Amino acid sequence: MKKILSFIFLSVLTLSSLAQNVDFQKAVAKFRGTTGVTAVATRVDHKAAVAEDDKATGTMVIQSPDKMNISVADGKEQLDMNGDDFTMIMRGREYKANSKKNNQFVAFQAVLTAIIKGDGTGLAEVPGVELTQKGNIITIHMDPTVGQAKKKRMMFSSFVITLDVKKGEILTLRMNGRGKNYTEYSFSGFVFKK
């Protein structure tokens, strides 16, 4: 009886994962085959110790197969992914990382690349990636500590991306820092170039 219940549970879990993957494929289908994507980006930088959030607007530019740049506040604040390399400019300081050398960005880079390519078939094998769905919204939670040895204090505790299955667009990208601090980008006005 336990074996039958385990089989049923695993089958339901597998079907649920497959359904989410099918919806993920739908959500990112517009990215497949495009030469580039642009959108309006709005950034909210939340510091728990500060009363008001810092807000700025700018653009997001995506180029296939694995380049993305989010630039706000007239380019003073940026998040740039070029393959395995990440560059962040925050509050006048530049930070560089490589997902092959810094385990904090492995899942983040894998998910962003899957979205840009419009194909998430390999996401199930990436440690720390969890997809959930509520209605037409897919939430991808990335925990950089899963399956990784902690070598030093991490800048981010997790990353969260939401996708709209119907619109086929990225809604938000959130980078959770220490404590209750976070930086969240929301996106609108997508233009997909062929």
Image (cartoon, rainbow, N blue to C red):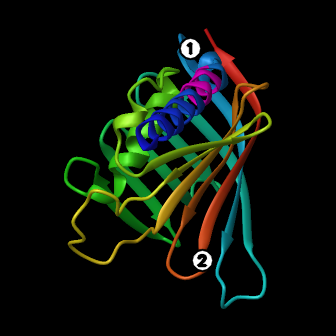
Q: Is residue 1 above or below residue 192?
A: below
Disc 2 secondary structure class: loop
Instruction: Classify 10 Å Cα crowding around label 1: few (below 14), some (14-19), many (20 and above).
Output: some
- In the image, 23: left or right of 148? right
Depth check, front residue: 34 or 17: 17
**Which amino acid does the dot numbered 1 rest on?**
Thr
Residue 9 versus residue 178 in the image, above or below: above
Calculate the distance from the C-alpha at mark 1 to the C-alpha at mark 2: 34 Å
| Bounds of the magenta segment | 18-25
**Element at label 1:** loop
Residue 38 position, x and y percent, is 65, 30
Q: Residue at x 39, y 53 (%)?
A: 87
Q: Is residue 6 magenta?
A: no
- Residue at x 25%, y 57% (from the top left corner): 102
Point out the image quarter for the C terminus. Answer: top right
Q: Would residue 20 be counted in the magenta stretch?
A: yes
Task: Tell me how many marks there are.
Answer: 2
Left or right of 149: which side holds 19? Answer: right
According to the image, label 2 marks what residue? 181
Task: Determine which quarter of the picture holds residue 66.
Answer: top left
Badge 1 or badge 2: first in the primary sequence: 1
Residue 124 shows which numbered tag?
none
Judging by the rendered image, the residue that carries numbered circle 1 is 34
Name the residue type under label 2: Asn
Question: Residue 90, image x and y in percent?
Answer: 50, 67
